[in-house]
Amino acid sequence: MRMPRSLQARLALSVGVVLTALWLVAATVTAVILRGEMVEVFDSALRETAERILPLAVSDIIAREDPGLTQRLGALHRFRVILRDRSIRDLSPVPTGDLPSELAPLAQTLNTLFGRLHQAFDAERSFAANAAHELRTPLAGAIAQAQRLQAETLDATARARAAEMESTLKRLTRLSERLMQLARAEGSPLRLGHASDLRAVAQLIVHDLTRAAPDRVTLSLPDAPVMSDLDPDAFGILCRNLLENALRHGAADSPVAVTLSPQGRFSVANDGPALEAGTLARLTTRFERGATKASGSGLGLAIVAAIASRIGTEVTLTSPRPGQTSGFEASLMLPVTA
């Protein structure tokens, strides 16, 4: 090839070569940049696809290669559900028959812990019940002596002190009875294998507590029997505590309303100043009493709450009474049979 002789031709050729080289360099750089961006786009797309497909693929692979694994995981899920749903008072052993062998020792250790807690709570309840029972006889004797002292003494001061002693001993007697009831509510079986009519128990308790003033209570019962497998003694304890609480803290000039519905809803309501929400929330705590000057052990509603928890329900405390501006109502649903 012959080179151009003129200077202009040579310059044109040089410029053309330089421009061609620059174009090639620009094209190469552009290709490299585009390649990197395309790689990033493809990587992002593959990553998103993998995140969506991988869980399904893993489940499918597990189901195909090891059918027993799914069953073992199902047993573990059932074990977790059993622990989650059981009552706080249920310390019976958890079934471990279908658990994987690797988890069986853990479940056995958990059941051992439940057993120890059950024994400790039983010992506590037995001590409270036995101590309260043993106190009944000496307390009755002390009350009789205080009453005799009041009848025989001529000194007014001594008579007043004897009366105060009698009142204190009677409060201690009521407290021991409440402790026995609480031990019964927390430990003994409350559901029986046969049903009885709850109306008869309610009538008996109301009659027993209103002998001196029958107009203090209005009792509303359905015409048909309200059959329940709840232990009549347990319902009697529940009814007595609610009614005594209502009579003690309610207005003396307004009757207490006791109602049992055919569906098993039992309620006791009285009239009096409305209680604050914070006070209501504490009333089922042991030895907790509202802002009242009336005497009491602070165990009545705690016993009712314990019985309700044992039979799978709860006590609802409302103040003021529904549809009114004052008063107090305690209600709960009792188990009834068809």
Image: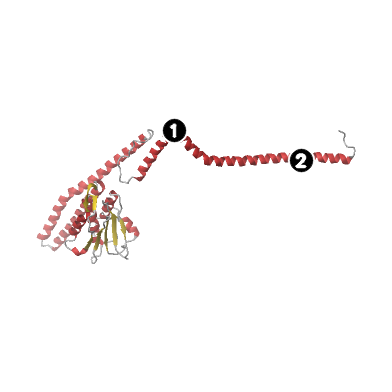
CA gap, disc 2 and disc 1: 62 Å
Residue positioned most to the bottom: 253
Figure label count: 2
Residue wearing tag 1 = 66
Residue 68, position as x, y percentages in the image: 41, 34
Question: Which residue occupies the foreground of this view, 109 or 15?
Answer: 15
Residue 41 placement: quadrant: top right
Circle 1 packing at 10 Å, graded few (<14), some (14-19), many (20+), is: few
The residue sitting at 37% across, 43% down in the picture is 81
Give the residue type at disc 2.
Leu
Asked whether disc 2 touches disc 1, contact meaning CB atoms under 8 Å apart, the reply is: no
Residue 22: which disc? 2
The residue under label 1 is which amino acid type? Asp
Observer able to see residue 47 = yes
Relative to 8, residue 182 above or below: below
Which label is found at residue 212?
none
Label 2: which secondary element: helix
Q: Position of residue 78 (x, y in %)?
A: 37, 40
Q: Residue at x 40, y 38 (%)?
A: 74
At label 2, counting other C-alpha atoms closer than 10 Å, the crowd grade (few under 14, some 14-19, many 20 or more) is few
32 and 264: which one is in front?
264
Q: Nearer the viewer, residue 155 or 141?
A: 141
Which of 120 and 93 lies nearest the eye of the viewer?
Answer: 93
